[in-house]
Image (spheres, grey):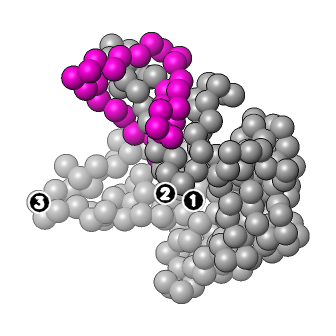
């Protein structure tokens, strides 16, 4: 699907008022500020529906549907996703707006309460937290999780790293051991290891930045600088 793009005002003075929406030549358009500073002019923001069909008046913004008629696979929710075997069908106001082949994308289409997603396994994984978006470790493999399902895997050992689990997240890291230089709290802190600025997270050394020649690493509070 194409992204919305700003339309600059042309010589025909195609001005608009905030909140206006329309379909013009199968282009979905809504009126918005060109910038977020509150003083910008109002312009039409557009998305060319291409082979799809523009739909307006059903929501605060128009959208591009895949077909002119509602899709029987879609419910009446304003924004949802459902599984049709291994296809993920994204819906808006009963119209299909995108279809993803999960068999190619990840392996399976699954239907947690929040809506259909593409996952690598057909069932929830006990290593995945139940929250909407999370990360976890399966030995040296980093798991990206959505609603308890694994949606992506990364082998940390392929780059010589370890998979670590912290109170805030899981990640691939150079070392799987806590670093005695790094404090347990606060969660993020900088320290000096000789003339190297060390970034610490939950007791792990996660990044190093050597100081340039002539500069020295100094700690101020929980930050470190090359001065």
Residue at horizontal 57 percent and vertical 79 percent from the top: 156
Give the class, few, some or many, for how many residues have Cα within 10 Å of label 2's Cα (few <14, many ≥20).
many
Write the residue at 34% across / 49% down: 224
Q: Identify the residue position indicated by label 3 in the image.
A: 214
User: Foreground: 65 or 6?
Assistant: 65
Q: Is 155 drawn above or below residue 116 in the view shown? A: below
Q: Which numbered dot is residue 203?
A: 1
x then y, percent, for residue 23: 53, 32
Q: Are marks 1 and 3 in contact (CB under 8 Å)?
A: no
Is disc 2 placed on a helix, strand or loop? strand
Q: Which residue is mark 2?
A: 200
Label 1 – label 3 distance at C-alpha: 29 Å
Q: Is residue 27 within the magenta segment?
A: yes
Q: Quadrant of residue 14?
A: top left
Give how far across and how far down residue 115 sits, in percent.
Answer: 80, 51
Total residue callouts:
3
Provide the major secondary structure of the magenta segment.
Answer: loop
- Say whether residue 139 is left or right of residue 35: right
Q: Are marks 2 and 1 in contact (CB under 8 Å)?
A: yes
Looking at the image, is 55 positioned above or below residue 168? above
Span shown in magenta:
3-30
Q: Nearer the viewer, residue 212 or 193?
A: 212
Picture quadrant where residue 103 is located? bottom right
Q: Earlier in the sequence, mark 3 or mark 2?
A: 2
Where is residue 27? Give x, y as percent: 48, 39
Judging from the image, what secondary structure is the residue with disc 3 in? loop
């Amino acid at each position: 699907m194409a992204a919305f793009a700003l339309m600059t005002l042309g010589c025909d003075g195609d001005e608009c008022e905030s909140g206006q929406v329309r379909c013009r030549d199968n282009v979905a358009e809504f009126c918005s500020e060109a910038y977020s500073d509150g003083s910008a002019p109002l312009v039409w923001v557009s998305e060319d529906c291409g082979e799809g069909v523009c739909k307006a008046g059903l929501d605060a913004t128009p959208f591009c549907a895949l077909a002119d008629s509602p899709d029987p696979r879609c419910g009446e929710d304003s924004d949802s996703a459902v599984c049709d075997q291994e296809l993920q069908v994204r819906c808006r106001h009963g119209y299909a707006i995108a279809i993803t082949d999960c068999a190619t994308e990840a392996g399976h289409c699954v239907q947690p309460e929040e809506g259909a997603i593409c996952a690598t396994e057909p069932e929830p994984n006990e290593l995945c937290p139940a929250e909407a978006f999370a990360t976890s470790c399966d030995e040296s493999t980093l798991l990206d999780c959505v609603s308890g399902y694994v949606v992506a895997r990364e082998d940390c050992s392929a780059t010589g790293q370890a998979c670590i689990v912290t109170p805030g997240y899981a990640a691939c890291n150079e070392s799987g051991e806590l670093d005695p230089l790094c404090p347990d709290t606060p969660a993020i802190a900088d320290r000096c290891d000789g003339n190297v600025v060390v970034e610490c997270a939950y007791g792990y050394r996660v990044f190093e930045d050597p100081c340039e020649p002539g500069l020295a690493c100094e700690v101020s509070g929980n930050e470190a600088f090359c001065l």
